[in-house]
Structure formats: structure tokens, C-alpha cells
Image: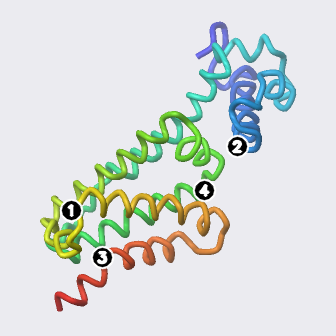
């Protein structure tokens, strides 16, 4: 918190304005093309006010990226209360997680552009996605699904995450599909055919 400022004061409103305007500018122009002078001008504050809250443009960018990461982690770490064993349980929870992630993204498109696509930490986010999906495979004892593909499990999971990333750009953020529809399509593409074969 800035020195000499109280929570809910005009100073806190200035900080919020800086974050909002920076988010808009970073998502439109990118990190390198956005200057501190652009941010303070858009927020209608002075440059000294900027430095009350942020050491640099980089620290403000990292603040925004951290906001995306917190929301992302909350979704990924949430576990289903009712665990149905086997393939159907795996598919149900995977679809639920992807759906929640898509809802979060559609509610925070500018934050997503930074946190999932442009920041240096975006690679770590995608790595955590692959870890989460691999964990689900083992949690539901569904490694045999991957074996039936005759492809290495890591390649299947990486392909799933790559498809998810591409569909976010081409369908979700373009509003071509609703989050629930896109989540269902993606999970069906990779895993639901295995349920029908097992029946």
C-alpha cells in the first residue's frame, strides 16, 4: 500500500484507475509500446502519483499478471466435491474445470491477454495447465485412455492444452461459442469417444 494513503481514500481510487487504464493500454498496444506517460494521462493522474503505488511499469504489469494468476490458480485448485470414479468422472471434472476457466477468461479478456498469452509467466501458466490435466488423469486412474492412442501421454496432454489455447483465441474471445459449448466440444474431441467405445 502507498505510504500516507488510507484504504478507500482518493489515493486508492487513483491506484485502481492506474490499474484499469494500464490494463486497457497493455492489452491494446502491448507492454513495450505502452509508456508510463500514456498510463498516467489515461488515468488523469500525475506521474508522481504513479510512483506512489508502483516502482516501475514492470511492477504494475506484474501486478496485473498476478491478478490473472490468482484467478487461474483458484479455478485449477478447486476440486469436485462429488468424485465419480473412472473415465466418466474424469471427463466430468475436466469439462467442469475447462468451463470454469473459459468463464473466467470471457469475464477477464484483457487480463487473459496479459496472463495467458503475453507475459513472461504465460509459459508457466500453460505448464501448470498440463500438470493439472496430468494430475486428473492419474486421480481418476485413466492412463489407459492415453495408452489407447498409442501416443506418449505428455504429447496428448500438451496437444489438449494447445487446442485449448487456440480455441480461446479463435472461438471464445471472438464470441463464436459459449464457454459451456466450447468446453464440451474440446473435451469430447479428446476423450468422450473413449466412453462410447467402452460401453
Label 3–label 2 contact, CB within 8 A: no
Residue 127: image quadrant is: top left
Residue that mark 1 sits on: 137
Q: Secondary structure at mark 3?
A: helix
What distance separates the C-alpha of mark 1 from that of mark 2? 34 Å
What distance separates the C-alpha of mark 4 from that of mark 1? 28 Å
Residue 50 on image: x %, y %: 74, 17
Residue that mark 3 sits on: 191
Identify the mark at residue 27; answer none if there is no mark.
2
Residue that mark 4 sits on: 107
Residue 152 to residue 23: above or below: below
What distance separates the C-alpha of mark 2 from that of mark 4? 14 Å
Label 3–label 4 contact, CB within 8 A: no
What distance separates the C-alpha of mark 3 from that of mark 4? 27 Å
At 46% from the left and 62% from the top, the residue drawn is 164
Decide which of 107, 13 is in the foreground and name it. 107
Identify the mark at residue 186; answer none if there is no mark.
none
Q: Earlier in the sequence, mark 3 or mark 4?
A: 4
Q: What is the crowding at mark 3: few (fewer than 14 residues within 10 Å), some, or many (at least 20)?
A: some
At 85% from the left and 32% from the top, the residue drawn is 42
Residue 105 to residue 86: above or below: above
Amino acid at each position: 500500500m502507498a505510504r500516507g494513503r488510507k484504504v478507500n481514500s482518493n489515493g486508492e481510487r487513483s491506484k485502481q484507475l492506474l490499474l484499469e487504464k494500464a490494463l486497457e493500454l497493455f492489452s491494446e498496444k502491448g507492454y513495450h509500446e505502452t509508456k508510463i506517460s500514456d498510463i498516467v494521462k489515461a488515468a488523469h493522474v500525475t506521474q508522481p502519483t504513479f510512483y506512489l503505488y508502483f516502482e516501475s511499469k514492470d511492477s504494475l504489469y506484474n501486478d496485473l499478471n498476478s491478478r490473472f494468476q490468482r484467478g487461474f490458480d483458484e479455478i485449477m485448485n478447486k476440486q469436485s466435491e462429488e468424485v465419480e470414479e473412472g473415465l466418466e468422472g474424469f471427463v466430468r471434472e475436466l469439462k467442469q474445470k475447462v468451463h470454469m476457466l473459459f468463464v473466467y477468461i470471457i469475464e477477464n479478456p484483457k487480463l487473459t491477454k496479459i496472463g495467458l498469452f503475453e507475459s513472461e509467466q504465460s509459459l508457466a501458466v500453460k505448464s501448470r495447465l498440463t500438470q493439472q490435466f496430468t494430475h486428473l488423469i492419474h486421480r481418476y486412474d485413466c492412463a489407459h485412455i492415453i495408452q489407447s492412442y498409442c501416443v506418449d501421454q505428455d504429447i496428448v496432454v500438451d496437444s489438449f492444452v494447445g487446442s485449448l489455447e487456440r480455441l480461446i483465441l479463435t472461438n471464445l474471445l471472438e464470441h463464436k461459442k459459449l464457454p459451456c459449448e466450447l468446453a464440451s466440444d474440446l473435451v469430447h474431441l479428446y476423450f468422450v469417444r473413449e466412453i462410447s467405445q467402452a460401453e
